[in-house]
Every structure is written in structure tokens, then in C-alpha cells.
């Protein structure tokens, strides 16, 4: 679901004979894939601070043995201008592990905390207040 494999650099922290330990979007594709709607200054800072994501987290994803969907409310926030996780991939994620609610941020890229921070904040408030306490 990560999209084009050519968009990523793999990091082999345990050696080339072992599975990758980290994954990063290639520097030349970060603006296009991660920060396409974000202000230039946020893109610049984020690119300097960006670190690899743990590759094993993507390899070991499973829904088996997970928490009861009714005991831990989960939501999915769709980022509608996301070039990293295209809409069809977001839809697959929703279908594979259905959340209790789905929201959307229409003007957001992959990083709504940069591209639409006020909208994200309002949505997170809405999500927090909509969760029913036992």
C-alpha cells in the first residue's frame, strides 16, 4: 500500500544480508509526495528533520489478535490530496481494518499538521468529543 517502490530508500541497519530496518521517501520526491499542499517553509524544515520510518512496522501489520473494535474507538482521517497514500490505498486500509468513523480533510496532503493545521485541530476536537465514554 505504500505505492511506487521506486519512491523509497531502504535502510539496512543490520546489514545488506538482513531485511531493511528503515524506509524513507527519496529526497527528490518528498515535496511531491509528502508536502504537496504544505507551505514551503514547513516543507524545508520537515525535510531537514525527517528520519526513516521503521520498515518492520510496515511488514508486520496484521489485524489478528488486535483489540476489540468496540473497546478502543478508532477513526480514520482521509487526506484527500495525499500523493503518498492515494485514495484507493486509503480505501483499502479502511476496508481491511474498519474504523468506527471516517473523516476527511479535503485540502490536505499527507501531512495535515503542515498543510491544514487549523482544520486538523478542529477535526481532532470533533473526534475527541464524539468518543463515548463507558
Image (cartoon, helix red, strand yellow):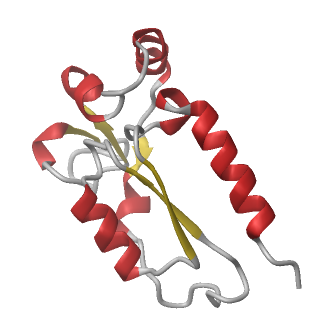
Instruction: Residue at 57% x, 85% y: name it.
Output: 66
Q: Is residue 97 left or right of residue 121?
A: left
Q: Position of residue 2 (x, y in %)?
A: 25, 55
Instruction: Residue at 89% x, 85% y: name it.
Output: 134
Q: Position of residue 52 (x, y in %)?
A: 41, 37
Residue nearest the observer in this picture, 66 or 101: 101
Report how many numbered discs are placed on residues in the image. Answer: 0
Q: Is residue 88 left or right of residue 42?
A: left
Residue nearest the observer in this picture, 79 or 13: 79
Q: Position of residue 6 (x, y in %)?
A: 10, 42
Instruction: Residue at 44% x, 60% y: name it.
Output: 57
Up the image or down, 67 lies above or below 26; here it is below
Q: Position of residue 15 (x, y in %)?
A: 29, 44
Q: Quadrant of the N terminus?
A: bottom left
- Residue 100 sits in quarter: bottom right
- Residue 126 sits in quarter: bottom right
Q: Is residue 1 visible?
A: no
Instruction: Residue at 47% x, 21% y: name it.
Output: 46
- Residue 130 sits in quarter: bottom right
Residue nearest the observer in this picture, 70 or 24: 70
Amino acid at each position: 500500500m505504500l505505492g511506487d517502490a521506486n519512491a523509497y530508500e531502504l535502510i539496512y541497519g543490520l546489514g545488506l544480508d538482513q531485511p531493511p530496518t528503515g524506509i524513507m521517501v527519496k529526497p527528490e520526491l518528498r515535496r511531491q509526495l509528502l508536502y504537496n499542499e504544505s507551505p514551503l517553509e514547513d516543507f524545508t524544515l520537515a525535510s531537514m528533520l525527517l528520519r526513516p520510518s521503521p520498515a518492520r512496522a510496515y511488514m508486520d501489520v496484521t489485524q489478528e489478535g488486535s483489540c476489540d473494535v468496540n473497546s478502543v474507538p478508532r477513526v480514520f482521517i482521509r487526506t484527500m490530496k495525499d500523493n503518498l497514500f492515494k485514495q484507493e490505498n486509503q480505501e483499502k486500509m479502511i476496508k481491511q481494518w474498519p474504523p468506527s468513523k471516517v473523516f476527511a480533510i479535503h485540502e490536505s496532503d499527507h501531512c495535515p499538521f503542515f498543510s491544514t493545521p487549523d482544520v486538523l485541530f478542529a477535526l481532532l476536537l470533533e473526534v475527541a468529543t464524539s468518543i463515548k465514554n463507558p
